[in-house]
Image: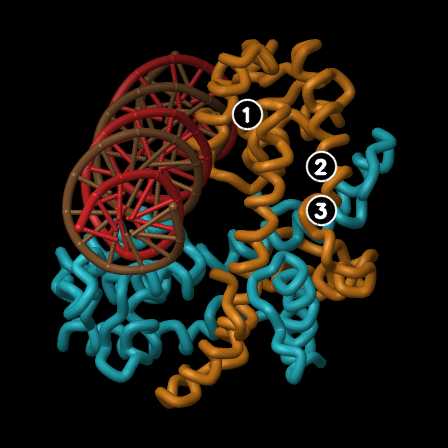
Chain colours: A cyan, B orange, C red, D brown
DNA sequence: TCCAAATACTTTGACGTCCAAGTATTTGTT
DNA sequence: AACAAATACTTGGACGTCAAAGTATTTGGA
């Protein structure tokens, strides 16, 4: 069922034909959406044999970068930019798999820490290898393409308020 | 809770620190994932007042571009590159909202056609206007950025076998 | 000191996506 | 003509995401 035409080109032509506006914005948005579909399919396929999916992997990776291998659930959500309920859900699953444990915060009893277990640390290493092996799904993008994507999307993220560029570091 | 550093830069530094491979691939993949999050949030927010989400809009738009305003469900899935079960689900919802009707295929009784209703056609026009007004969520991306994204992702899509470039049209 | 507001997390529920399996129909081959 | 294989769609189940509401705890004034 591989198409013999570019569905995004086709869509652009249709939009123009219908007299709809913002065709170039539409193609950019559609490209990004489709790229995400492709990557997410490849990444989850690479992680499945390791017993993870991308969100679970992200949490483990984040924990593995901290000094103690632990972080409040709220911080996890902030860093990964996902909803608190999703963090709860993901950590539930990781905990059930024995890759992470919940631990009360020593001074703030509202807060729960997610702590990487020994198994969790081993698993995240395996996953990192598996992901590197498929180049995170971006095989097919040249070095130039990758840089172009990073740079363009950086504009978008800054405009969306993802983070504030400190004045000293503006490029 | 806006961060005062770029979480993707931070992640890259962490990956390097951990000695993990394919850091540039990882940043490209993460950028695309995050861009998708941003767009999809903006797009669904713009469509909500119209009573649609992006998948439902895509189906309506696709139908509106055909001569008769109708298409077999399977074709819809092929064009939009989504799973048949998702098409069923989306069309169920559109049908419940009176924006589309199911109709048996005249000659192949396995096949079901989705037909745009008058309401559906009116709705998709409203939605197109709403989306154009927010530039499909890519406000923040300059013209150059949009072209760069399109071009880079085209590589990725071709490499992923999204479609076959006819020899006559190779660029 | 007291209490309303903010913060941290969980729960519940609405949706969406995909896979796998099931039903119906058509096609392609003996 | 007969039937296995392919095609088209639906169903049911596992997961993921987010929003809204609920519980517990801490904070920041009056």
Q: Say yes or no: labels 2 and 3 on the same chain.
A: no
For discs 2 and 3, the disc positioned in front in the rendered view: 2
Locate residue A65 relative to residue B54 in the image: left or right. Answer: left
Label 2, secondary structure: give it.
Answer: helix
Q: Position of residue A8 (x, y in %)?
A: 71, 46
Label 1, secondary structure: give it.
Answer: helix
Q: Position of residue A50 (x, y in %)?
A: 25, 66
Which label belongs to residue B73?
A: 1
Name the residue that disc number 3 marks: A8
Name the residue that disc number 2 marks: B131
Q: Quadrant of residue D6?
A: top left
Locate residue A56 relative to residue B144 in the image: left or right. Answer: left
Q: Chain of mark 3?
A: A
Kindly tell me whether residue A5 is visible in this rendering.
no
Q: Position of residue A2 (x, y in %)?
A: 60, 47
Q: Say yes or no: labels 1 and 2 on the same chain.
A: yes
Dot 2 crowding, Cα within 10 Å, few <14, some 14–19, many 20+: many
Label 3, secondary structure: give it.
Answer: helix
Question: How many marks on residues?
Answer: 3
Between B122 and B85, the one nearer to me in the picture: B122
Query: Dots 1 and 2: beta carbons under 8 Å?
Result: no
Dot 3 crowding, Cα within 10 Å, few <14, some 14–19, many 20+: some
Kindly tell me whether residue A146 is visible in this rendering.
yes
Image quarter of the C terminus of chain B: bottom right
Between B1 and B27, the one nearer to me in the picture: B1
Q: Residue at x 27, y 65 (%)?
A: A72
Locate residue A24 relative to residue A138 in the image: left or right. Answer: right
Q: Find the distance from the CA under tag 2 to the CA under tag 3.
A: 17 Å
Q: Find the distance from the CA under tag 1 to the CA under tag 2.
A: 24 Å
Q: Find the distance from the CA under tag 1 to the CA under tag 3.
A: 19 Å
């Amino acid at each position: 069922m591989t198409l013999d035409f570019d569905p995004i080109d086709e869509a652009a032509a249709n939009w123009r034909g219908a007299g709809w506006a913002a065709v170039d914005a539409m193609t950019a948005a559609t490209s990004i959406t489709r790229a995400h579909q492709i990557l997410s399919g490849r990444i989850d396929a690479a992680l499945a044999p390791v017993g993870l999916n991308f969100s679970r992997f992200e949490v483990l990776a984040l924990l593995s970068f901290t000094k103690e291998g632990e972080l409040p659930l709220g911080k996890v959500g902030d860093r990964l930019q996902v909803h608190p309920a999703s963090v709860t859900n993901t950590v539930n699953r990781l905990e059930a798999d024995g890759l992470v444990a919940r631990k009360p915060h020593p001074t703030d009893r509202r807060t729960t820490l997610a702590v990487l277990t020994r198994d969790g640390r081993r698993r995240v290493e395996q996953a990192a290898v598996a992901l590197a092996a498929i180049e995170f799904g971006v095989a097919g993008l040249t070095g130039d393409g990758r840089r172009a994507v990073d740079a363009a999307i950086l504009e978008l993220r800054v405009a969306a308020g993802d983070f504030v560029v400190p004045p000293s570091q503006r490029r």
